[in-house]
């Protein structure tokens, strides 16, 4: 729902009856601020996850150095719980640990793999990019919408954008399409409606 915050900002500012240029500046500022905020938040969150993974791996490395036989037994127990018979589980654990003991425990005991490991910078860029793409949609509407109908055009187009995003997100995640779309549209409309009311009130006061 990345277009909703910027759309709400644009609708709220536009409701105060500023010039189109001022609405555009506010929208661009919202896009930049939102993208940077998303990037910073994602970077901090994923960095914390990466720190936790490093600590877990360091602890696992020490446990392997201290008692490798117990760690082999522990790994075999994991494979038994997944359905292997005890003899085969012990054999698999022994062979995997002979190849890469830390890697085997990281993957099967800690749930850490090369493909799932935390990458803070990559996550930050992805989050900022997703926000920027979504926020660009209402900004493009500002450029083409008539000045006197800016609020309803941005509101209506944003509802369409949110509906499309909700459908795509539902299909990607295998969720019910109608429920997902309605949820996103409902809260997006509420956000834009409230900011429009605030903008109109502020424009009347000043």
Image (spheres, rainbow, N blue to C red):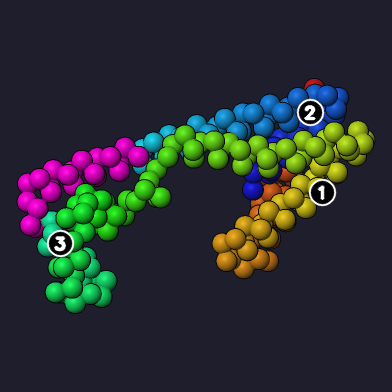
Query: What element does badge 3 sit on?
Result: helix
From which residue to which does the magenta span run? Answer: 50-70
Horizontal and vertical percent for residue 60? 18, 47
x 72%, y 56%: residue: 163
Q: Is residue 205 visible?
A: no
Foreground residue among 185 and 166: 166
Foreground residue among 107 and 46: 107
Foreground residue among 38 and 185: 38
The residue labelled by disc 2 is 24
Q: Sequence order check: which comes first, mark 2 or mark 1?
A: 2
Left or right of 73, for residue 78: right
Measured in 3D between alpha carbons, the distance from the residue under mark 3 to the one under mark 2, in whole angstroms, is: 64 Å
Residue 146, quarter of the rendered image: top right
Horizontal and vertical percent for residue 83? 25, 75
Measured in 3D between alpha carbons, the distance from the residue under mark 1 to the one under mark 3, in whole angstroms, is: 62 Å
Q: Residue 164 — which label?
A: none
Q: Sequence order check: which comes first, mark 3 or mark 2?
A: 2
Query: What element does badge 1 sit on?
Result: helix
Label 2 environment density (alpha carbons within 10 Å; few <14, some 14–19, many ≥20): some
Measured in 3D between alpha carbons, the distance from the residue under mark 2 to the one under mark 1, in whole angstroms, is: 17 Å
Q: Is residue 163 visible?
A: yes
The residue labelled by disc 3 is 94
Label 3 environment density (alpha carbons within 10 Å; few <14, some 14–19, many ≥20): some
Left or right of 78, for residue 155: right
């Amino acid at each position: 729902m990345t277009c909703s915050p910027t759309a709400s900002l644009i609708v709220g500012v536009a409701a105060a009856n500023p010039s189109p240029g001022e609405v555009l500046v506010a929208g661009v500022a919202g896009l930049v601020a939102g993208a940077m905020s998303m990037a910073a938040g994602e970077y901090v969150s994923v960095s914390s996850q990466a720190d936790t993974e490093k600590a877990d791996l360091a602890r696992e490395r020490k446990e392997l150095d201290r008692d490798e036989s117990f760690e082999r037994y522990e790994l075999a127990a994991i494979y038994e719980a997944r359905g292997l018979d005890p003899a085969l589980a012990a054999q698999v654990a022994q062979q995997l640990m002979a190849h890469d003991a830390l890697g085997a425990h990281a993957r099967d005991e800690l749930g850490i793999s090369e493909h799932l490991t935390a990458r803070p910078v990559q996550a930050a860029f992805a989050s900022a990019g997703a926000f920027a793409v979504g926020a660009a949609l209402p900004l493009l509407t500002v450029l083409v919408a008539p000045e006197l109908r800016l609020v309803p055009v941005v509101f209506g187009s944003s509802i369409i954008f949110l509906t499309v995003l909700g459908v795509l997100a539902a299909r990607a995640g295998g969720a019910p399409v109608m429920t997902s779309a309605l949820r996103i549209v409902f809260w997006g409309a509420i956000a834009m409606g409230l900011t429009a009311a605030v903008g109109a009130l502020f424009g009347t006061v000043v």
